[in-house]
Amino acid sequence: SVRLKSCSGFASRSFPRFRLPAIAMGDAEYSFSLTTFAPSGKLLQIEYALNRVAEGRPALGIKAKNGVVLATEKRVTSPLVDETSMRKIENLSENTGMVYAGMPPDYRVLVSRGRKQAQQYYGVYREVIPVSQLVRDQAATMQEFTQSGGVRPFGISLMIAGYDETGPQLFQVDPSGAYFGWKASAIGKNHVNAKSFLEKRYNEDVELEDAIHTAILTLKEGFEEAITAENIEIGIVGPDKKFRVLTPAEVQDYLAEVE
């Protein structure tokens, strides 16, 4: 403790000395640096970006035997917002689409870059870009923003679905630039519970139609209100290799089937 000398008639008092844990204090000094590792071996800005992703609206992907489905919660912040102007699932190319959890502005940047990469590939080779290459390009962009001064990591994770010559594919890309192929995965709020739900219900022989039902049931598990065709969004790609977002009427039909 620290003892103060008495003065002007006041008695001396002792105050406890507060100390931060050595590791926490050491890491705190690096929390604003993107390009410097903390003593614990972490890049803390990436950890913070993952925290932002974990607070985002839930999204998930399921790879079926004959296609892939992406699904996400789409909730507007005000009843005055035009719902038709908001889309969380977007095409990158004819056969590939993606969804995100995290910061919408960051997503728009990656959608734009992904589409540009897909068009550049088509312009050179006159064929659709392979799904895995498009994923690598997106991951490389995100990784670049973890290794450069004056920038910050992207505050989003992506689920990318596509169908090419190798069949249906599903990938997840995180803010660090790490990416993996998945049979089924979830990102955003309650992603741990969603993954546990998918682990119990997933079957490698599942058909695309059943995968859509499973996706809806998984979202429904974490919903705080009634699930409707207006507050979720679903995208699919099948053997025709055409990625598309389902219309609200189509989503409503699938909702009726699972109830």
Image: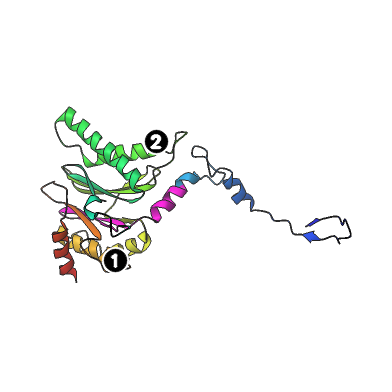
Q: Which residue is drawn at 23% across and 63% down?
A: 216
Amino acid type indicated by mark 1:
Lys
Q: Say if 48 sits above or below 201 in the image.
A: above
Q: Does the magenta stretch include residue 56?
A: yes
Placement of the C terminus among the 4 image quadrants: bottom left
Q: Where is residue 3 in the image (x, y as percent from the top left)?
A: 82, 56
Residue farthest toward the top in the current orientation of the protein? 124
Q: Most extreme residue toward the right, as rendered?
A: 9
Mark with earlier residue (1, 2): 2
* Residue 207 in view, yes or no: no
Q: Give percent across and percent down for residue 117.
A: 25, 34
Q: In this view, does 239 lie to the left or right of 88?
A: left
Residue 80 in magenta stretch = no
Q: What residue type is labelled 2?
A: Glu
Residue 212, image x and y in percent?
A: 19, 60
Q: What element carries label 1?
A: helix
Residues rendered magenta in the picture: 47-76
Q: Residue 144 carries which label?
A: 2
Residue 141: % across, % down: 35, 37
Q: Name the residue under label 1.
A: 200
The dot on residue 59 is none
Task: Tell me the SS state at disc 2.
Answer: helix
